[in-house]
């Protein structure tokens, strides 16, 4: 909660008058949404002029309102007496409301539907790749799993595409290229790799998060050998569209959904990068593995493909293909609605439909097809209960928006952060040269999350000293 200063203070105001107090969470949410509503009434419906791309319009404002109300309805902010029963102001008023209000989900549901309808009316749609694929993929493109990889990957990097509701063309200042350089793999044949740092490496946990080819979690798919997922096996002909035939890789990398192959680079998989298609070999001393005496390496043994444009080349900053960073995509509105509607009404066909919009673009079975089939689903009809569907919606969201900056806030608002952010970061043994050595799991880093303290950031000592009316967040 923050202080709301919606009236200008006179220049003659004394120290006490300018020492503002924090408002409650509900007051902050009301102020934000009322301000958005006021703006909507005076904004253009949609701004698509090349000179004004990214300017806030009604579609963007309504989309932002959807996100704000979804957060407000979530467990961290809605009736959270577990964490904040003693977090009160000088008058004894709770900063966080203490009683759960289901109607907040209805507000989020209605705001999301309004934003969806307005966006679609203005021509927005989930992205599909319609260009001619590069020559190196002319034959591979006949496979649906390859087509879907193009849909998924270019939905992020195709500049100002029609799924993008709000984009930021310059998110990190003048050095925009750095956003991709941290994830861009080095080319072993290039004399310069000044803009390819390969520092950002997906964790084992993020890799395991993606669904199987059946659109089910890896621990719920009866056709996926979960207990032996870290074992290594030969890559078959049928798996060649996403992994190198006759090579050997972990079972964890096989028979997964298209978003996994679009977003994650793994040993003996592929990466479409530097304007070509690479056969990844990521053990130490191999083409894309760690080279001795270098600190630029993928610490978990995985590469991040998602935020890197396939045509970006790392031998020069000017060869990084720029695109507008997706702050809000249409897919988010679909999943915002699904989450809010399930919390308010429970499972309905409308919730399934919104989820399936995202799943079908990703190239996986619908919710009903995946969880109604007893031959593949360990938890048959999971989607027909509110708790089960909640779990499905949350995993769908974590997958769809992985590496886009949503995960941290989602885990916090669901009050699940301590379950995810207290475990070691794990990956493969990238300093090993042999197959057995490389495919040995190891801890590559430690994390800690102190609950409930870390759910809110601290106010700096300097600010508390300047304004003695501010109350510090709990635990700090």
Image (tube, grey):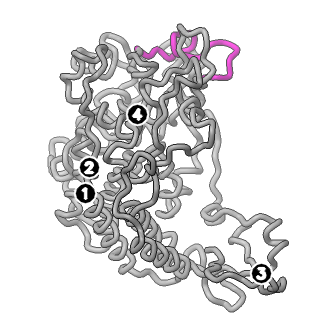
Is residue 474 highlighted in magenta?
Answer: no
Tag 2–tag 1 contact (CB < 8 Å): yes
Residue 342 shows up from this direction: no
The residue located at (30%, 72%) in the rendering is 110
Tell me which numbered mark, 4 or 3, is placed earlier along the sequence.
3
Residue at 28% across, 67% down: 113
Residue 19 bears which disc, if any? 3
| 53 over 248 or under it: above or below | below
The residue beneath circle 4 is: 263
Does residue 227 appear to the left or right of 39 in the view shown? left
Whole-Å distance between the Cαs marked 4 and 1?
Answer: 27 Å
Label annotation for residue 120: 1
Q: Answer with mark 2 or mark 1, whichever residue precedes in sequence.
A: 1
Label 1 Cα crowd, 10 Å radius (few <14 / some 14-19 / many 20+): some
- Report how far apart the C-alphas of labels 3 and 1 lie in the structure: 45 Å
Apparent side of residue 96 relative to residue 240 in the rendered image (left or right): right
Residue at numbered disc 2: 125
The residues tagged by marks 2 and 1 sit, at their Cα atoms, a distance apart of 6 Å
Q: Give the range drawn in magenta.
A: 279-297
């Amino acid at each position: 909660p923050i202080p709301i200063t919606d009236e200008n203070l006179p220049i003659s105001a004394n120290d006490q008058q300018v020492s503002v107090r924090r408002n409650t969470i509900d007051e902050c949410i009301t102020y934000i949404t009322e301000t958005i509503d006021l703006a909507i009434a005076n904004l253009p419906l949609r701004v698509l002029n090349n000179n004004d791309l990214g300017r806030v319009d009604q579609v963007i404002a309504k989309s932002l309102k959807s996100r704000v109300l979804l957060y407000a309805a979530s467990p961290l902010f809605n009736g959270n007496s577990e964490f904040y029963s003693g977090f009160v102001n000088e008058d004894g008023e709770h900063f966080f409301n203490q009683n759960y209000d289901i109607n907040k989900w209805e507000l989020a549901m209605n705001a999301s539907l309004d934003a969806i309808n307005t966006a679609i009316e203005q021509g927005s749609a989930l992205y599909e790749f319609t260009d001619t694929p590069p020559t190196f993929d002319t034959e591979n493109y006949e496979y649906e799993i390859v087509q879907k990889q193009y849909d998924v990957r270019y939905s992020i990097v195709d500049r100002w595409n029609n799924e993008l509701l709000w984009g930021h063309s310059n998110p990190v200042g003048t050095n925009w290229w750095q956003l991709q350089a941290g994830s861009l793999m080095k080319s072993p044949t290039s004399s310069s790799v000044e803009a390819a740092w390969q520092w950002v490496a997906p964790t084992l946990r993020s890799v395991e998060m993606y669904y199987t080819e059946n659109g089910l979690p890896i621990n719920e798919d009866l056709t996926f050998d979960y207990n032996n997922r870290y074992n290594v096996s030969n890559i078959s002909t049928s798996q060649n569209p996403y992994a190198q035939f006759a090579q050997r890789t972990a079972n964890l990398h096989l028979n997964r959904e298209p978003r996994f192959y679009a977003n994650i680079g793994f040993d003996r998989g592929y990466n479409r990068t530097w304007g070509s298609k690479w056969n990844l070999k990521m053990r130490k001393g191999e083409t894309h593995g760690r080279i001795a005496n270098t600190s630029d390496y993928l610490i978990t043994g995985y590469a991040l493909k998602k935020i890197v444009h396939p045509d970006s080349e790392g031998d020069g900053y000017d060869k990084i293909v720029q695109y507008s960073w997706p702050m809000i995509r249409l897919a988010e509105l679909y999943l915002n609605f699904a989450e809010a509607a399930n919390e308010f009404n429970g499972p309905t066909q409308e919730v399934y439909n919104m989820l399936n919009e995202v799943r079908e673009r990703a190239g996986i079975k619908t919710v009903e097809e995946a969880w109604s089939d007893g031959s593949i689903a360990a938890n048959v009809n999971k989607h027909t209960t509110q708790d089960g569907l909640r779990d499905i919606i949350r995993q769908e969201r974590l997958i769809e928006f992985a590496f886009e900056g949503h995960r941290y806030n989602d885990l916090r608002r669901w009050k699940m952060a301590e379950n995810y952010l207290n475990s070691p970061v794990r990956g493969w043994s990238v300093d090993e040269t042999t197959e057995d050595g490389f495919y040995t799991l190891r801890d590559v880093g430690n994390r800690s999350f102190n609950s409930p303290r870390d759910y809110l950031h601290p106010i700096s000592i300097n600010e508390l000293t300047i304004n003695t009316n501010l109350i510090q967040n709990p635990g700090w």
